[in-house]
Amino acid sequence: MKTILARSPTAEYKQAKRPVREEAQKRLDRLFRKREPYLKWWKQIRDYELPFHGDFEENKARGESEEIYNSTARDAAAIFAGGVMSGLTPPSRQWFKLALSDEGAPKEAEVILDERQAIMQRVLARSNFYHAVYSCYHDLPFGQAPLGIFSATDGVHFVHYPIGSYALDTDAVGLVNTFARKVRMTAGQIIEQFGEKNAPQAVRDAAKNRSERMFVVCWLVEQNTERRGGRLGPQSMPYRSLYWVEGSPQDEYLTQGGMEEWPVPVARYQVIGLEPYAKGAGWYALADSKMLQVMERDILTAIEMGIKPPMQTSAGTALGVNLFPGGVTVNAAADGVRPLFEVQLNVEAVQAKIEQVEQKVRRAYAADLFLMLDQIERGQMTAREIMERTQEKLQQLGPVVERLQYEFLNPILERVYGLLDRGGVFPPLPPELAEQLGEAEVRIEYISPLAQAQKMSGLVNIEQTLSFAGQVAQLFPEVLTKIDAMTMLDVYHDNIGAPAAMLRSTEEAQQILAAQQEAQEAEEAQAMQMAQLQQAAPLAQAAKNLTDAANDGNPAIREWLGMPNAGGGNP
């Protein structure tokens, strides 16, 4: 697929009015100041739980944190990311379905949507989507994780932005509608992405001199409040994208672009009010993770103390007490060499406490739930078994799943659909369908293992109702007339997300039933006619036999048949 799918965020446009750079810089700076209270929490989560995450200024060459003695949180975060991946967006199976909001839509339209859905799945599979979205899920314990979606010459490209590298803002209903980012780039990287003629003079000079100087590139994506209808270019698009080099001359941009859909969907865990930043599992596990590191460090120190206790001995001088494992304290009054003090530690009790705290951390990350959900993919457990065993946990996780679907996956699929549609990747609609559908709204249904596990409660209700009706019908057959089998099957089919092509419409089913009933009635009438003919043949034969007997002169039969006696008159 070698086609430009949509306008690139770095494409060039001619505008009658350029956004004021000074105002854009002020908005970006304000967004980064607004996130300051969250930085300390993010850094603590990094220090005590996820040491290799984040893009903060002070950790460009950072290794593993010295605070990490216990990796429970890190392992739980990996289970969480893998669980959300396999539960919501599994690469190995279909996890979403396109449908029309109009229930009366023709069958052909549903089949075409199934074809477009298959194309979208192939595009996602051939792109870096699953790698990028997994990185987002792995960052979700911080609270949120953005995913950039851009067109490319060979498909669609996705970019994960690590915690600490961006700033957000929301609209009046709490949805993210502003994304800002600062990234350090060399002059060569800037010219490669934006073109030499779009770069400031300082960047061009640095590139010419092959300088390793780093420039701060600012990117701001926001709603286009100056949108103009009836014109081409970014001024007519719902969102605008501005790039510039920090410190470059006023009103000088690297590029100005526009997007038809929101290009940076943000996965958020739990949101309070209109805050742009969310609270994730790492927030709720932070206190226990800190406790784990302290306890693990102390028990290691105590064990080492027991193996190599600090010693004391006599000497003419003493420089102090050495409390390190294996250390020696000089004591003039000591008689021989012996331990400075005896370490009495119940290691088993401390280990039991550590295990309790580890379990609390795993619960905060829902690690146990996601391990169960993974068994759906492996065929070891059905969605109903998962629901029955973890119904309470699924209810607790339900709001998070719904938020991820509504705020994150919906915009992703809408953006990808728009890029493919504008790029001419989808087969054209037949003229009659194109006119019939017109402005029909396409909705997204999720049929992933986690979505199905949540929907199972509705399916269980259907199955329990049908089972109870079957039991009652053994005593009162008339109750079966209350069940609308067609509607029941439609609801069940929609809940499990089966392909539209496998189910006939109610009208088609009724026509088939009418034809079958008509054929059955004709067959029954023919069978009845044959039975009547078969019954008539013996009767006709019997009548013939009686007539023949009477004609042969049998007086009793002649009298029974009312025939005159032979020879007439009285004997």
Image: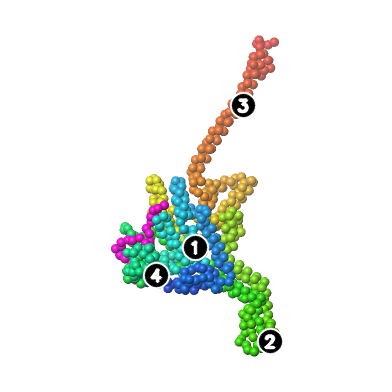
Answer few, some or many: residues within 10 Å of disc 4's Cα (few below 14, many 20 plus, some between 14 and 19).
few
Regarding mark 3 in the picture, which secondary structure is present there?
A: helix
Q: Earlier in the sequence, mark 4 or mark 2?
A: 4
Disc 4 to disc 3, C-alpha distance: 108 Å
| Mark 2 lies on residue | 334
| Mark 3 lies on residue | 535
Q: Which residues are magenta?
A: 1-22
Answer few, some or many: residues within 10 Å of disc 1's Cα (few below 14, many 20 plus, some between 14 and 19).
many
For discs 1 and 3, the disc positioned in front in the rendered view: 1
- Figure check: 28 above or below 432: below
Regarding mark 1 in the picture, which secondary structure is present there?
A: helix
Q: Principal SS element in the magenta part?
A: loop
| Mark 4 lies on residue | 212
Specify how the rendered protein is coloured. Answer: rainbow
- Figure check: 285 above or below 336: above
- Report the residue at 32% width, 71% height from top: 249
Amino acid type for the residue under numbered disc 2: Ala
Disc 2 to disc 3, C-alpha distance: 127 Å
